[in-house]
């Protein structure tokens, strides 16, 4: 069960997922970059407890960006999608597109300060 998609196609699907976000959420995505990498590093997998890592949010969640907290001038937060793991758990193109979309929404949820347990309960 694996569906291969080249990097260009994968990035197009990612852009489409971002374009499909509701405007009220897109307006709040500040100082945030999206990156596609083939695989997570062993350290990233180990730090997050192992398993299949599809995406990763790194940064300061929006609720913690308060004046006086030292966020001003910070490097962009980063959401990374891992192409090979996403492809390895996808059976066909539609499945992969849906998993990319769900992973984007899951990681954006972290950006908004939502934890894994709540995101899973919401279906992400």
Image: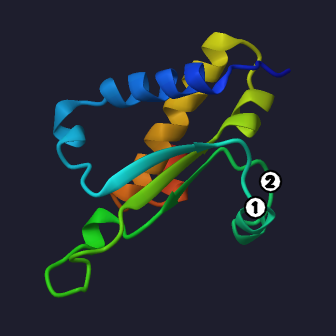
Q: Residues within 10 Å of mark 1 (few under 14, many from 20)?
A: some
| Secondary element at image label 2 | loop
Classify residue 3 as left or right of residue 19. Answer: right
Classify residue 84 as left or right of residue 11. Answer: right
- On screen, 122 above or below 77? above
Can see residue 124? no
- Report the residue at 45% width, 57% height from top: 78
Can see residue 43? yes
In 3D space, how far apart are the residues under numbered discs 1 and 2 (Cα atoms)? 7 Å
- On screen, 23 above or below 33? above
Residue farthest front in this picture: 8
Which x, y percent locates residue 106? Answer: 49, 45
Marks counted in the figure total 2
Q: Which residue in the protein does label 1 denote?
A: 45
Q: Quadrant of residue 71?
A: bottom left
Q: Which residue in the protein does label 2 denote?
A: 51
Which x, y percent locates residue 48? Answer: 69, 65
Quadrant into which the N terminus falls? top right
- On screen, 81 above or below 41? above
């Amino acid at each position: 069960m694996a569906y291969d998609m080249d990097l260009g196609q994968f990035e197009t699907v990612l852009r489409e997922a971002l374009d499909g976000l509701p405007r009220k959420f897109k307006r709040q995505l500040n100082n945030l970059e999206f990156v596609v990498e083939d695989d997570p590093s062993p350290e990233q997998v180990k730090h997050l407890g192992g398993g299949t890592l599809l995406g990763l949010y790194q940064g300061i969640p929006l609720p913690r960006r308060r004046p006086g907290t030292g966020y001003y001038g910070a490097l962009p937060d980063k959401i990374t999608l891992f192409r090979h793991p996403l492809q390895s758990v996808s059976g066909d193109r539609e499945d992969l597109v849906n998993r990319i979309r769900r992973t984007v929404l899951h990681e954006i949820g972290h950006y908004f300060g939502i934890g894994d347990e709540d995101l899973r309960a919401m279906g992400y």
